[in-house]
Image (cartoon, helix red, strand yellow):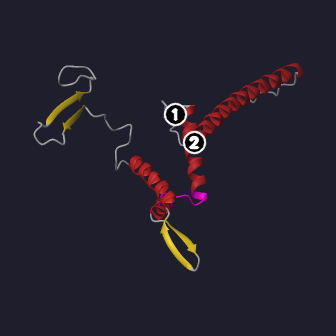
């Protein structure tokens, strides 16, 4: 048998009040999560704009992971929309490596290598090669384990003896002859 509808005004008001509280609580939780995602996405985009890496999130299902994926997707869409592709970037850098400067001296026009643009393009090209893994970066390279110094003392007088000294410094700062560097 179907239930009769509640007609008591006090109970109806109480039910509406509970529903409003539940709705307000859900909305507060949603706003807090949205605010956190927005802040993290903003931080990720700021790191990307400055060229600094952003630490990877611990959990892919966390709010941080969601923010990271959202910011990455937003950045990719923005780059694609503006025509910034890896091929285009590499093409511009490659063109910069061979850039020429045109100079007009009187009636003569000459073209010379534009060293400022070439140096900048080679710097960018080296960074791209490091990130692509073709060459080791500064963080990946290891310092030399030892340094060898050869000293040759020569004089103008042919009767004097030529002196040669060899010293090797190890990574601990100790010279091969036992002294400290």
Q: Residue beneath label 1, please? A: 61
Q: Secondary structure at mark 1?
A: loop
Depth order, front residue of 4/145: 145
Asked whether 83 falls inside the magenta stretch, the response is: yes
Q: Is residue 172 left or right of residue 47?
A: left
Camera-side mark, 1 or 2: 2
Between 16 and 131, the one nearer to me in the picture = 131
**Quarter placement of the C terminus:** top left
At x 12%, y 43%, the residue is 158
Can you identify the residue that label 2 sits on?
50
Dominant secondary structure of the magenta stretch?
Answer: helix
In percent of the image, x 88 and y 19: which residue is there? Answer: 10
The quarter of the rendered structure image containing the N terminus is top right
**Mark positioned earlier in the residue sequence (1 or 2):** 2
* Residue 142 showing in the rendered view: yes
Residue 18 x, y percent position in the rendering: 78, 22
């Amino acid at each position: 048998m179907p239930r009769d509808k509640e007609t008591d005004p006090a109970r109806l008001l109480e039910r509406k009040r509970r529903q409003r509280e539940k709705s307000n609580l859900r909305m507060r939780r949603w706003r807090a999560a949205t605010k956190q995602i927005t802040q993290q996405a903003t931080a990720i985009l700021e790191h990307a704009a400055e060229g600094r890496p952003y630490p990877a999130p611990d959990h892919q299902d966390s709010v941080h992971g969601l923010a990271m994926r959202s910011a990455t997707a937003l950045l990719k869409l923005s780059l694609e929309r503006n025509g910034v592709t890896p091929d285009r970037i590499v093409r511009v850098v490659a063109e910069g490596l061979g850039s020429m400067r045109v100079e007009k001296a009187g009636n003569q026009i000459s073209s010379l290598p534009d060293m400022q643009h070439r140096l900048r393009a080679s710097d960018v090209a080296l960074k791209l090669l490091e990130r692509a893994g073709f060459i080791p970066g500064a963080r990946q390279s290891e310092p030399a384990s030892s340094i060898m110094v050869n000293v040759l003392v020569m004089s103008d007088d042919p009767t004097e003896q030529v002196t040669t000294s060899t010293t090797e410094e190890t990574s601990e700062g100790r010279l091969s002859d036992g002294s400290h560097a």
